[in-house]
Amino acid sequence: MVNDRIEDQHFTVSFCPLCGSGVLFATNINLVDGKTANLNFGVSGLLYNSDLLMYDRNTQSLWSQISAEAISGPMVGTKLPTLPVWHTTWASWQERHPQTQIMHGDKRFADAYKTNPYPNYEKNRGLYFSVTNKAPRQFHPKEKVLGVNLGGISKAYPFVKLREYGKRCFTDKIAGQTIRIEWDDANNSAWITDMDGEAMASLTSFWFAWFTFHPEAQMFGYVDNANLKACQL
């Protein structure tokens, strides 16, 4: 977890290896007493539906990463605004953003990041911790999906289905809004933009993690789907 800012935008970058989920939050929000503060987050060491629970050092509230909501403490029920984030390879990112700045890690902990605490976790079907809603077996539990929430409707785009569909770019309609889904097979990456090409907030995670938080979500299906149209990059 990283707390940072770019100009006046304060944000927190979080990643849960158990859910494969990286989420970017805007952290300048209104507190319960009406004041505005830049929340500073840490890892609580606790889990909720196998997903990491964050805590803010301002109020000691616990926050669910995937639902982006405080589940206990003074901020309970408060939602954090999510910002667009892109899961991809370093090579792909650098090609698009050659002048990018890079976070410099603390050298005291460098060795800790050289080993994977969950070896083979992404390949096997087992979960280390229980979840409320168990995903159907139509996909591998660790299959990556691109999920989006718009107008009270959630929809998931499994990477295996995006690969089968084979379109580099296509549009879809959710809750009356037309969006663009872009798929990069070479880097196993997908993201969503509006029709002006502006990135939109979405979630890339394992299938089981998306489902347990969004059991009523729609599923991407490209057969006889009139909403889908190919587009140009």
Image: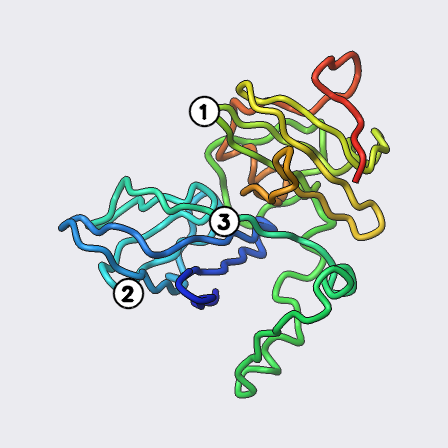
Count the marks: 3
Q: Residue at x 64, y 52 (%)?
A: 86
> Which image quadrant is residue 141 in?
top right
* Vertical order, 228 against 83 (above or below): above
According to the picture, the residue beneath numbered tag 1 turns out to be 152
Q: What percent of the width, then of the height, locates residue 103?
A: 57, 74
Indicate the quadrant containing the C terminus: top left, top right, bottom left or bottom right. top right
CA gap between label 2 and label 3 equals 21 Å
Relative to 191, 153 lies left or right:
left
> Which residue occupies 49% across, 38% down?
131
> Which one is earlier in the sequence, the residue at label 3 or at label 1?
3
Residue that badge 3 annotates: 83
Determine the residue located farthest toward the front in the rendered image. Answer: 196
For the residue pair 49 and 173, the one nearer the viewer reads as 173
Q: Amino acid at mark 2?
A: Arg
Closer to the camera: disc 1 or disc 2? Answer: 1
Amino acid on which disc 3 is placed: Leu
Residue 186 is situated, as x and y percent measured from the top left of the image, at 85, 50
**Label 1 secondary element:** loop
Q: Amino acid at mark 1?
A: Gly
2 vs 3, front mark: 3
Residue at the far left in the pictured view: 33
